[in-house]
């Protein structure tokens, strides 16, 4: 994300709508190391802000491709996550409402970091308790697995 975009999103007058692309494959989950604030350095789902006129599903597909080079089709919304960060004075520094979208991988699973992602990696599900993994990832993965179990 260009520095100007990051600055525009600090101290917002309204929440920003974002997406996370949740990709499960062979008992692993795809995560990216965030390259910019907020959450810089944390492993999280590939994702970003929904553009004006863009559907949540289209945004998830686009963001996954931009950050990892992978292609996938949206399956369903599996969670909605809010990220609110306040400064020392209590003012809202960042506020995102993030729609987590389960994706079905097309083709290969060979991902590479691009765009806002500093790194990309497939994590075994038992690694999700690491301190540098975003706290909501485990819950979203559990919901995505339950969705897959119900719907095949």
Image (spheres, rainbow, N blue to C red):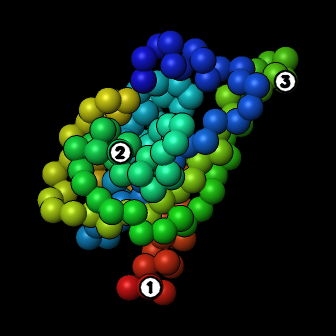
Q: Closer to the camera, 130 or 57?
A: 57
Q: Quadrant of residue 33?
A: top left
Q: Could you tell me which residue is drawn at 67 percent across and 28 percent down?
A: 94
Q: Secondary structure at mark 3?
A: loop
Which numbered disc covers residue 151? 1
Q: Quadrant of residue 93?
A: top right
* Mark 1 burial class by Cα count in 10 Å: few <14, some 14-19, many 20+: few
Residue that badge 2 annotates: 62
Q: Could you tell me which residue is drawn at 48 percent across and 87 percent down?
A: 150
Q: Residue furthest right?
A: 89
44 left or right of 121?
right
Residue that badge 3 annotates: 90
Q: Could you tell me which residue is drawn at 58 percent across and 15 percent down?
A: 7
Q: Earlier in the sequence, mark 1 or mark 3?
A: 3
Q: Quadrant of the N terminus?
A: top left
Residue 57 in the image, given as x and y percentages of width and height? 45, 56
């Amino acid at each position: 994300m260009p520095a100007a975009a990051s600055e525009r999103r600090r101290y917002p007058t309204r929440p920003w709508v974002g997406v996370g692309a949740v990709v499960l494959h062979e008992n692993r989950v795809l995560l990216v190391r965030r390259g910019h604030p907020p959450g810089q350095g944390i492993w999280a789902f590939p994702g970003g802000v929904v553009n004006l006129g863009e559907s949540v599903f289209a945004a998830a597909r686009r963001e996954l491709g931009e950050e990892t080079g992978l292609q996938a089709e949206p399956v369903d919304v599996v969670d909605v996550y809010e990220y609110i960060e306040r400064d020392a004075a209590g003012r809202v520094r960042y506020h995102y409402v993030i729609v987590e979208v389960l994706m079905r991988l097309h083709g290969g699973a060979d991902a590479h970091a691009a765009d806002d992602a500093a790194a990309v990696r497939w994590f075994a599900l038992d690694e999700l308790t690491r301190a540098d993994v975003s706290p909501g990832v485990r819950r979203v993965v559990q919901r995505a697995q339950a969705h897959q179990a119900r719907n095949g």
